[in-house]
Amino acid sequence: MAAGEEGGQAAEPAAVEEPEVAVEEPRSFKDLGVTDVLCEACDQLGWKTPTKIQVEAIPVALQGRDIIGLAETGSGKTGAFALPILQALLDTPQRLFALVLTPTRELAFQISEQFEALGSSIGVHTTTPGRLVDHLENTKGFNLRALKFLVMDEADRILNMDFETEVDKILKVIPRDRKTFLFSATMTKKVQKLQRAALKNPVKCAVSSKYQTVEKLQQYYIFIPSKFKDSYLVYILNELAGNSFMIFCSTCNNTQRTALLLRNLGFTAIPLHGQMSQNKRLGSLNKFKAKARSILLATDVASRGLDIPHVDVVINFDIPTHSKDYIHRVGRTARAGRSGKSITFVTQYDVELFQRIEHLIGKKLPAFPMQEEEVMMLTERVAEAQRFARMELREQGEKKRSRNGDDDDTEEAIGVRNKVAGGKKKKRKAF
């Protein structure tokens, strides 16, 4: 309720029509108030014009206000908080200036790379220490008492991953006199509670209030018996050979198993999940981004935030339990105006979840064209590869306690897979 409206007793003044004034949107970072040296850095990164969230958030942040930024992944959120922080750092240089909290280390590394790229000409350094609370409690001499900026990126995911206790501990030991930026794809009750606890009189900068997928994304589903999921996956990879794929699985174990299965059949597949060491996770991500591997199998650790520019096809091998995660997963393709495909596997157990997804995005998805007879021809070879994958998975579990190397597990366990692939390591099409 606006000030002065309470009670509704006073007569409304006559409306006065004012001439409409065309407001020109800022067309450069300089128009937003970004200093010249940082505008040059944006230009070197290929950032020609600011995104919607940057237009909304940067001027407000430069005024020294706390911000709640609501925007989807891939919307330019990192620039929206990094540029104001770097500009403030130019005005008052100091060692420990800003803290950025993220739900995953991969996202933390990506953000650090953007900070260092934007601040390369002014000597900015970043570090990604991992679990911050461990350092606060156990690293002698480490504290955050000089902090000037706190950023919580992907705040809804931070809270959904049960980091509330850790966030509370951090909030208790950082200065009250600070600027706080909270960015989230959704305004959940947990995020609202965090906002009240951490921000002072924030400005809300929202550029997306509706869940939707981009127009150039071709979305399909396939309805299949659960026991033949692996065979259908191999069929699709063969049919769309030559593309890059992100395949989403619901668990770490199924991610690893499916990666082993596909490698046994000659595909260049690599896993990314939370039970891998940090070096292996970054190694998988970098190999895929460098196009050294064409198939990345991942849990939802890779569904949001990460900038992977060349994904042609997203496959929901396991349908997401939460409908909103579908938006984030398929958002890995058809980015920056490019086209892309997504294919969602729907078994007899997934119908209700799939209907919720269609309701959320407001459209009925078409079936992906399939040749059932060709799929069935693959079942024998796939069954053999499944058996070898299970054996390798058991071997990895037994060796895990004693092995500390950083090589990719799926590339180490190669002893028997050449038998399945016909004695030679095949590149793409397995059959």
Image (spheres, helix red, strand yellow):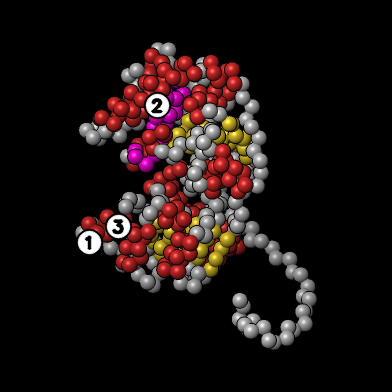
131 or 321, which lies in front? 321
Q: Secondary structure at mark 2?
A: helix
Viewer-nearest of discs 2 and 1: 2
Instruction: Tell me, yes or no, if residue 256 can be seen here.
Output: yes
The x and y percentages for residue 47 are 56, 50
Magenta includes 190? no
The correct choice, above or below, for 311 with respect to 3 in the image is above
Q: Nearer the viewer, residue 273 or 122?
A: 273
Q: CA distance from mark 2 to mark 3?
A: 35 Å
The 10 Å Cα crowd at callout 1, few under 14, some 14 to 19, many 20 or more, is few
The boundaries of the magenta stretch are 256-276
Q: Position of residue 286 (x, y in %)?
A: 42, 37
Which residue was labeled with disc 2?
260
Q: Check whether the beta carbons of the residues at disc 3 and disc 1 lie within 8 A of each other.
A: no
Q: Nearer the viewer, mark 2 or mark 3?
A: 2
**Residue at the bottom extreme?**
10
What is the x, y in percent for residue 100? 40, 57
Q: Earlier in the sequence, mark 3 or mark 1?
A: 3
Q: Amino acid at mark 1?
A: Gly
Locate residue 178: give its quadrant: bottom left
Residue shown at the point (37%, 71%) measured from the top left = 176
* Residue contact between numbered discs 2 and 1, judged by CB atoms under 8 Å: no
The residue where tag 3 is placed is 133
SS label for mark 3: helix
* Residue under pointer 1: 141
Write the residue at 56% across / 38% down.
351
Residue at 30% of width from left, 57% of height from top?
133
Label 3 Cα crowd, 10 Å radius (few <14 / some 14-19 / many 20+): some
CA distance for labels 3 and 1: 14 Å
* Up-down relation of residue 67 to residue 413 (above or below): below
